[in-house]
Amino acid sequence: MSALVFLLGLLPAGAQAQEALADTQELIRAEVVRVVREEHIEVPGTTLQVTVQTVDARTKEGSVLTFEYDLSPKLRPGNDVIIKRTTTIEGDVYLTYQDRDRRVLLGVLGLAFASMFVLLLGKRSWRTLASLAVSLCAIFFVLVPAITAGYAPIPITIAIAGTVLALAIFMTHGFSSQGITAFAGTFLAVGVSIVLASLVVALAGFTGTGNDAAVYLNVTTRGTLDLPAVLLASIIIGMLGVLDDVAVTQAAIVEELKAANQAYRFKELYRAAMRVGRDHISALTNTLVFAYVGAALPLVLLMSLMETPLTYLVNQEMVADEIVRILVGSMGLMLAVPLTTVIAAWWWHARVPQGAPAHTHAHHKES
Protein backbone atom coordinates (compact mmCIF):
# COMPACT_ATOMS: atom_id res chain seq x y z
CA MET A 1 0.00 0.00 0.00
CA SER A 2 2.95 2.34 0.65
CA ALA A 3 3.95 1.95 -3.00
CA LEU A 4 0.47 3.09 -4.02
CA VAL A 5 0.68 6.17 -1.77
CA PHE A 6 4.14 6.97 -3.13
CA LEU A 7 2.95 6.72 -6.74
CA LEU A 8 -0.02 8.98 -6.00
CA GLY A 9 2.48 11.62 -4.91
CA LEU A 10 4.22 11.41 -8.27
CA LEU A 11 1.19 12.54 -10.23
CA PRO A 12 1.10 16.17 -11.38
CA ALA A 13 -0.97 18.47 -9.19
CA GLY A 14 -2.86 20.00 -12.08
CA ALA A 15 -3.62 19.25 -15.69
CA GLN A 16 -1.55 20.94 -18.31
CA ALA A 17 -3.22 23.63 -20.35
CA GLN A 18 -4.62 22.40 -23.63
CA GLU A 19 -5.05 24.30 -26.81
CA ALA A 20 -8.58 25.49 -27.44
CA LEU A 21 -10.30 23.71 -30.31
CA ALA A 22 -11.92 25.67 -33.08
CA ASP A 23 -14.92 23.32 -33.17
CA THR A 24 -16.94 22.25 -30.13
CA GLN A 25 -18.13 18.67 -29.76
CA GLU A 26 -20.82 17.19 -27.54
CA LEU A 27 -21.92 13.60 -26.99
CA ILE A 28 -25.69 13.19 -26.70
CA ARG A 29 -27.67 10.13 -25.61
CA ALA A 30 -30.84 9.55 -27.62
CA GLU A 31 -33.40 6.85 -28.37
CA VAL A 32 -34.23 5.85 -31.94
CA VAL A 33 -37.88 6.66 -32.65
CA ARG A 34 -38.05 5.78 -36.35
CA VAL A 35 -36.04 4.92 -39.42
CA VAL A 36 -36.97 7.55 -42.00
CA ARG A 37 -35.58 5.65 -45.00
CA GLU A 38 -33.02 3.10 -46.15
CA GLU A 39 -30.85 3.36 -49.25
CA HIS A 40 -28.55 0.79 -50.85
CA ILE A 41 -25.42 2.53 -52.09
CA GLU A 42 -22.64 0.89 -54.08
CA VAL A 43 -19.10 1.56 -52.81
CA PRO A 44 -17.15 3.32 -55.59
CA GLY A 45 -14.64 1.06 -57.35
CA THR A 46 -16.15 -2.15 -55.94
CA THR A 47 -19.23 -4.34 -56.29
CA LEU A 48 -20.01 -3.97 -52.59
CA GLN A 49 -23.22 -2.36 -51.42
CA VAL A 50 -23.91 -0.75 -48.06
CA THR A 51 -27.25 0.10 -46.53
CA VAL A 52 -27.51 3.70 -45.33
CA GLN A 53 -30.28 4.47 -42.85
CA THR A 54 -31.62 7.93 -42.12
CA VAL A 55 -32.67 7.83 -38.48
CA ASP A 56 -34.66 10.06 -36.11
CA ALA A 57 -33.70 9.82 -32.43
CA ARG A 58 -35.19 11.67 -29.43
CA THR A 59 -33.02 13.07 -26.64
CA LYS A 60 -34.08 13.10 -22.99
CA GLU A 61 -34.96 16.79 -23.41
CA GLY A 62 -37.46 15.81 -26.11
CA SER A 63 -35.70 17.21 -29.19
CA VAL A 64 -35.45 14.99 -32.28
CA LEU A 65 -32.07 14.59 -34.02
CA THR A 66 -31.65 13.18 -37.53
CA PHE A 67 -28.48 11.40 -38.58
CA GLU A 68 -27.23 8.76 -41.03
CA TYR A 69 -26.07 5.24 -40.10
CA ASP A 70 -24.30 2.74 -42.40
CA LEU A 71 -23.13 -0.03 -40.06
CA SER A 72 -24.45 -3.46 -39.09
CA PRO A 73 -26.69 -4.51 -37.41
CA LYS A 74 -29.36 -2.05 -38.52
CA LEU A 75 -30.85 0.38 -36.04
CA ARG A 76 -34.44 -0.13 -34.89
CA PRO A 77 -36.90 1.98 -32.91
CA GLY A 78 -36.10 1.69 -29.21
CA ASN A 79 -32.33 1.39 -29.66
CA ASP A 80 -30.30 3.70 -27.42
CA VAL A 81 -27.54 5.50 -29.29
CA ILE A 82 -24.86 8.12 -28.68
CA ILE A 83 -24.68 10.95 -31.20
CA LYS A 84 -21.83 13.41 -31.60
CA ARG A 85 -22.91 16.98 -32.27
CA THR A 86 -20.14 19.12 -33.76
CA THR A 87 -20.55 22.88 -33.92
CA THR A 88 -18.05 24.65 -36.14
CA ILE A 89 -16.61 28.07 -35.46
CA GLU A 90 -18.93 29.39 -38.19
CA GLY A 91 -21.95 28.02 -36.32
CA ASP A 92 -22.70 25.03 -38.58
CA VAL A 93 -23.95 21.93 -36.76
CA TYR A 94 -23.19 18.35 -37.84
CA LEU A 95 -24.65 15.19 -36.30
CA THR A 96 -22.83 11.87 -36.58
CA TYR A 97 -23.52 8.46 -35.12
CA GLN A 98 -20.96 7.61 -32.43
CA ASP A 99 -21.98 4.27 -30.93
CA ARG A 100 -24.74 2.25 -29.31
CA ASP A 101 -25.39 3.22 -25.68
CA ARG A 102 -24.53 0.04 -23.77
CA ARG A 103 -24.04 1.53 -20.30
CA VAL A 104 -27.27 0.17 -18.81
CA LEU A 105 -26.61 -3.30 -20.23
CA LEU A 106 -23.04 -3.30 -18.92
CA GLY A 107 -24.28 -2.16 -15.51
CA VAL A 108 -26.81 -4.99 -15.36
CA LEU A 109 -24.17 -7.50 -16.47
CA GLY A 110 -21.76 -6.23 -13.81
CA LEU A 111 -24.46 -6.49 -11.15
CA ALA A 112 -25.26 -10.05 -12.25
CA PHE A 113 -21.56 -10.96 -12.03
CA ALA A 114 -21.23 -9.48 -8.53
CA SER A 115 -24.43 -11.20 -7.35
CA MET A 116 -23.29 -14.60 -8.64
CA PHE A 117 -19.87 -14.05 -7.11
CA VAL A 118 -21.31 -13.21 -3.68
CA LEU A 119 -23.77 -16.10 -3.87
CA LEU A 120 -21.08 -18.70 -4.60
CA LEU A 121 -18.25 -17.40 -2.38
CA GLY A 122 -20.23 -16.10 0.60
CA LYS A 123 -18.49 -13.73 3.03
CA ARG A 124 -15.08 -14.09 1.38
CA SER A 125 -16.49 -12.57 -1.82
CA TRP A 126 -16.64 -9.11 -0.25
CA ARG A 127 -12.91 -9.15 0.47
CA THR A 128 -12.21 -10.36 -3.06
CA LEU A 129 -14.42 -7.71 -4.67
CA ALA A 130 -12.87 -5.02 -2.46
CA SER A 131 -9.34 -6.05 -3.44
CA LEU A 132 -10.37 -6.14 -7.11
CA ALA A 133 -11.88 -2.64 -6.87
CA VAL A 134 -8.78 -1.20 -5.18
CA SER A 135 -6.49 -2.94 -7.68
CA LEU A 136 -8.43 -1.51 -10.64
CA CYS A 137 -8.30 1.93 -9.03
CA ALA A 138 -4.51 1.57 -8.72
CA ILE A 139 -4.29 0.76 -12.43
CA PHE A 140 -6.76 3.34 -13.78
CA PHE A 141 -6.09 6.22 -11.37
CA VAL A 142 -2.36 5.79 -10.69
CA LEU A 143 -0.68 3.72 -13.42
CA VAL A 144 -2.54 5.18 -16.41
CA PRO A 145 -2.24 8.88 -15.40
CA ALA A 146 1.43 8.39 -14.44
CA ILE A 147 2.33 6.86 -17.83
CA THR A 148 0.39 9.48 -19.80
CA ALA A 149 2.07 12.19 -17.71
CA GLY A 150 5.42 10.99 -18.98
CA TYR A 151 6.79 8.85 -16.15
CA ALA A 152 8.81 5.73 -17.06
CA PRO A 153 6.25 2.92 -17.57
CA ILE A 154 8.34 -0.02 -16.30
CA PRO A 155 9.25 1.10 -12.74
CA ILE A 156 5.71 2.32 -12.12
CA THR A 157 4.21 -0.89 -13.53
CA ILE A 158 6.46 -3.04 -11.32
CA ALA A 159 5.40 -1.04 -8.24
CA ILE A 160 1.73 -1.32 -9.23
CA ALA A 161 2.13 -5.04 -9.93
CA GLY A 162 3.54 -5.59 -6.45
CA THR A 163 0.73 -3.54 -4.92
CA VAL A 164 -1.96 -5.36 -6.90
CA LEU A 165 -0.55 -8.78 -5.97
CA ALA A 166 -0.38 -7.84 -2.29
CA LEU A 167 -3.95 -6.53 -2.33
CA ALA A 168 -5.30 -9.52 -4.27
CA ILE A 169 -3.62 -12.12 -2.07
CA PHE A 170 -3.66 -10.61 1.42
CA MET A 171 -7.10 -8.98 1.26
CA THR A 172 -8.62 -12.20 -0.05
CA HIS A 173 -6.69 -14.85 1.89
CA GLY A 174 -5.47 -12.85 4.86
CA PHE A 175 -1.93 -12.29 6.13
CA SER A 176 -1.44 -16.01 6.66
CA SER A 177 1.20 -18.59 5.84
CA GLN A 178 -0.68 -19.40 2.66
CA GLY A 179 -0.83 -15.75 1.63
CA ILE A 180 2.83 -15.04 2.42
CA THR A 181 4.17 -18.05 0.48
CA ALA A 182 1.82 -17.39 -2.46
CA PHE A 183 2.89 -13.73 -2.64
CA ALA A 184 6.59 -14.63 -2.50
CA GLY A 185 6.28 -17.23 -5.25
CA THR A 186 4.17 -14.99 -7.47
CA PHE A 187 6.44 -11.97 -7.07
CA LEU A 188 9.54 -14.02 -7.93
CA ALA A 189 7.78 -15.46 -11.02
CA VAL A 190 6.71 -11.96 -12.11
CA GLY A 191 10.28 -10.71 -11.63
CA VAL A 192 11.76 -13.44 -13.83
CA SER A 193 8.99 -12.92 -16.41
CA ILE A 194 9.73 -9.17 -16.54
CA VAL A 195 13.40 -9.86 -17.28
CA LEU A 196 12.46 -12.38 -19.96
CA ALA A 197 9.84 -10.10 -21.55
CA SER A 198 12.24 -7.12 -21.52
CA LEU A 199 14.87 -9.20 -23.30
CA VAL A 200 12.42 -10.48 -25.93
CA VAL A 201 10.90 -7.04 -26.61
CA ALA A 202 14.39 -5.56 -27.05
CA LEU A 203 15.71 -8.38 -29.26
CA ALA A 204 12.56 -8.45 -31.40
CA GLY A 205 12.78 -4.72 -32.03
CA PHE A 206 9.10 -4.17 -31.20
CA THR A 207 7.93 -0.61 -31.82
CA GLY A 208 4.84 -1.02 -29.64
CA THR A 209 2.53 -0.09 -32.54
CA GLY A 210 1.24 -3.59 -33.24
CA ASN A 211 -2.44 -2.61 -32.90
CA ASP A 212 -4.65 0.33 -33.82
CA ALA A 213 -5.04 1.51 -30.22
CA ALA A 214 -1.26 1.89 -29.86
CA VAL A 215 -1.09 3.83 -33.13
CA TYR A 216 -3.86 6.20 -32.01
CA LEU A 217 -2.13 6.56 -28.63
CA ASN A 218 1.12 7.51 -30.35
CA VAL A 219 -0.64 10.12 -32.49
CA THR A 220 -2.65 11.54 -29.58
CA THR A 221 0.44 11.90 -27.36
CA ARG A 222 2.50 13.23 -30.31
CA GLY A 223 5.03 10.43 -29.95
CA THR A 224 6.05 11.34 -26.40
CA LEU A 225 5.37 7.89 -24.91
CA ASP A 226 7.82 4.99 -24.91
CA LEU A 227 5.53 2.52 -26.70
CA PRO A 228 7.83 -0.54 -26.38
CA ALA A 229 7.84 0.10 -22.62
CA VAL A 230 4.04 0.42 -22.69
CA LEU A 231 3.87 -2.95 -24.48
CA LEU A 232 6.06 -4.49 -21.79
CA ALA A 233 3.88 -2.92 -19.08
CA SER A 234 0.77 -4.45 -20.67
CA ILE A 235 2.43 -7.90 -20.66
CA ILE A 236 3.24 -7.53 -16.94
CA ILE A 237 -0.30 -6.46 -15.99
CA GLY A 238 -1.83 -9.19 -18.16
CA MET A 239 -0.08 -12.04 -16.36
CA LEU A 240 -0.94 -10.99 -12.78
CA GLY A 241 -4.34 -12.66 -12.49
CA VAL A 242 -3.38 -16.14 -13.64
CA LEU A 243 -0.15 -16.13 -11.59
CA ASP A 244 -2.08 -15.10 -8.47
CA ASP A 245 -4.49 -18.00 -9.00
CA VAL A 246 -1.89 -20.71 -9.49
CA ALA A 247 0.34 -19.51 -6.63
CA VAL A 248 -2.48 -19.42 -4.08
CA THR A 249 -3.60 -22.89 -5.18
CA GLN A 250 -0.10 -24.35 -4.82
CA ALA A 251 0.39 -22.77 -1.40
CA ALA A 252 -2.93 -24.21 -0.26
CA ILE A 253 -2.02 -27.68 -1.60
CA VAL A 254 1.25 -27.74 0.35
CA GLU A 255 -0.52 -26.61 3.51
CA GLU A 256 -3.17 -29.30 3.19
CA LEU A 257 -0.57 -32.00 2.46
CA LYS A 258 1.33 -31.07 5.60
CA ALA A 259 -1.90 -31.11 7.61
CA ALA A 260 -2.81 -34.54 6.26
CA ASN A 261 0.61 -36.04 6.92
CA GLN A 262 2.82 -34.22 9.41
CA ALA A 263 5.68 -36.66 8.72
CA TYR A 264 6.18 -35.16 5.26
CA ARG A 265 9.60 -33.57 4.83
CA PHE A 266 10.60 -30.88 2.34
CA LYS A 267 11.21 -33.18 -0.66
CA GLU A 268 8.04 -35.17 -0.04
CA LEU A 269 5.92 -32.01 0.24
CA TYR A 270 7.45 -30.61 -2.94
CA ARG A 271 7.00 -33.76 -5.00
CA ALA A 272 3.44 -34.39 -3.86
CA ALA A 273 2.38 -30.77 -4.51
CA MET A 274 4.06 -30.68 -7.92
CA ARG A 275 2.04 -33.71 -9.07
CA VAL A 276 -1.06 -31.55 -8.69
CA GLY A 277 0.75 -28.44 -9.93
CA ARG A 278 1.64 -30.02 -13.27
CA ASP A 279 -2.04 -30.67 -13.99
CA HIS A 280 -2.80 -27.08 -13.02
CA ILE A 281 -0.13 -25.80 -15.39
CA SER A 282 -1.62 -27.78 -18.29
CA ALA A 283 -5.13 -26.53 -17.66
CA LEU A 284 -4.19 -22.87 -17.14
CA THR A 285 -1.82 -22.80 -20.13
CA ASN A 286 -4.71 -23.94 -22.33
CA THR A 287 -6.91 -21.28 -20.74
CA LEU A 288 -4.30 -18.58 -21.37
CA VAL A 289 -3.71 -19.57 -25.00
CA PHE A 290 -7.40 -19.82 -25.89
CA ALA A 291 -8.16 -16.52 -24.15
CA TYR A 292 -5.58 -14.72 -26.31
CA VAL A 293 -6.60 -16.53 -29.52
CA GLY A 294 -10.27 -15.75 -28.84
CA ALA A 295 -9.51 -12.07 -28.32
CA ALA A 296 -7.47 -12.03 -31.54
CA LEU A 297 -9.99 -14.02 -33.62
CA PRO A 298 -10.62 -11.21 -36.18
CA LEU A 299 -6.87 -11.03 -36.73
CA VAL A 300 -6.70 -14.83 -37.13
CA LEU A 301 -9.50 -14.68 -39.71
CA LEU A 302 -7.71 -11.90 -41.59
CA MET A 303 -4.51 -13.95 -41.66
CA SER A 304 -6.38 -16.95 -43.08
CA LEU A 305 -7.50 -14.85 -46.07
CA MET A 306 -4.01 -13.61 -46.95
CA GLU A 307 -1.76 -15.32 -49.47
CA THR A 308 1.40 -14.33 -47.60
CA PRO A 309 3.41 -17.30 -46.24
CA LEU A 310 2.58 -18.16 -42.66
CA THR A 311 6.12 -17.50 -41.43
CA TYR A 312 5.93 -13.91 -42.69
CA LEU A 313 2.48 -13.38 -41.17
CA VAL A 314 3.69 -14.60 -37.79
CA ASN A 315 6.67 -12.26 -38.08
CA GLN A 316 4.44 -9.17 -38.34
CA GLU A 317 4.43 -7.17 -35.12
CA MET A 318 0.65 -7.29 -34.69
CA VAL A 319 0.92 -11.09 -34.52
CA ALA A 320 4.35 -11.45 -32.93
CA ASP A 321 3.52 -9.36 -29.87
CA GLU A 322 0.46 -11.54 -29.18
CA ILE A 323 2.66 -14.63 -29.43
CA VAL A 324 5.09 -13.07 -26.98
CA ARG A 325 2.22 -12.37 -24.56
CA ILE A 326 1.13 -16.01 -24.74
CA LEU A 327 4.60 -17.50 -24.37
CA VAL A 328 5.88 -15.15 -21.66
CA GLY A 329 2.62 -15.46 -19.73
CA SER A 330 2.75 -19.25 -19.96
CA MET A 331 6.41 -19.31 -18.89
CA GLY A 332 5.60 -17.08 -15.94
CA LEU A 333 2.80 -19.49 -15.04
CA MET A 334 5.16 -22.47 -15.24
CA LEU A 335 7.70 -20.66 -13.05
CA ALA A 336 5.13 -19.68 -10.43
CA VAL A 337 4.19 -23.30 -9.68
CA PRO A 338 7.64 -24.67 -8.69
CA LEU A 339 8.73 -21.39 -7.05
CA THR A 340 5.64 -21.20 -4.87
CA THR A 341 5.83 -24.92 -4.13
CA VAL A 342 9.50 -24.66 -3.05
CA ILE A 343 8.79 -21.69 -0.79
CA ALA A 344 5.67 -23.24 0.74
CA ALA A 345 7.35 -26.62 1.28
CA TRP A 346 10.31 -24.95 2.98
CA TRP A 347 7.97 -22.77 5.05
CA TRP A 348 5.91 -25.67 6.41
CA HIS A 349 8.91 -27.97 6.85
CA ALA A 350 10.87 -25.30 8.75
CA ARG A 351 8.04 -23.87 10.84
CA VAL A 352 6.06 -26.99 11.74
CA PRO A 353 8.02 -29.62 13.67
CA GLN A 354 7.06 -33.27 13.27
CA GLY A 355 4.08 -34.17 15.39
CA ALA A 356 2.86 -30.57 15.69
CA PRO A 357 -0.38 -29.30 14.11
CA ALA A 358 0.26 -28.03 10.57
CA HIS A 359 -2.38 -25.31 10.57
CA THR A 360 -1.11 -22.08 12.08
CA HIS A 361 -4.34 -20.19 11.56
CA ALA A 362 -7.93 -21.05 12.25
CA HIS A 363 -10.30 -22.06 9.49
CA HIS A 364 -13.81 -20.70 9.76
CA LYS A 365 -16.78 -22.02 7.90
CA GLU A 366 -18.02 -19.32 5.56
CA SER A 367 -21.51 -19.07 4.26
Image (cartoon, rainbow, N blue to C red):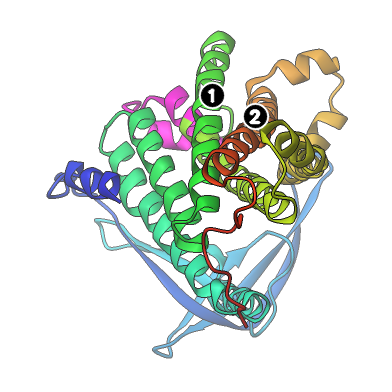
Q: CA distance from mark 1 to mark 2?
A: 8 Å
Q: Is residue 328 above or below residue 57?
A: above
Which of 131 and 253 lies nearest the eye of the viewer?
Answer: 253
- Local SS, label 1: helix
Q: Nearer the viewer, residue 201 or 261?
A: 261
What residue does disc 1 label? 192
- Left or right placement of residue 336 versus residue 192 in this view: right
Farthest bottom residue in view? 62
Badge 1: residue crowd in 10 Å (few <14, some 14–19, many ≥20): some
Q: Nearer the viewer, residue 235 or 333?
A: 333
Q: How many numbered circles does the render carry?
A: 2
Magenta-colored span: 212-232
Residue drawn at x 58%, y 70% is: 363
Residue toward you, 153 or 358: 358
Q: Is residue 333 above or below residue 228?
A: below
Is residue 316 visible in the rendered image? The answer is yes
At label 1, the amino acid type is: Val
Asked if residue 220 can be seen in this view, the reply is no
Residue wearing tag 2:
335
Residue 33 highlighted magenta (yes or no): no
Earlier residue among tags 1 and 2: 1
Asked if residue 218 is among those painted magenta in the image, a careful observer would answer: yes
* Whether label 1 touches label 2, CB < 8 Å: yes
Q: Residue at x 69, y 37 (%)?
A: 265
Q: Is disc 2 surrounded by few (<14), some (14 to 19) or many (20+) residues within 10 Å?
A: many
On residue 103, the disc is: none
Q: Position of residue 144 (x, y in %)?
A: 36, 45
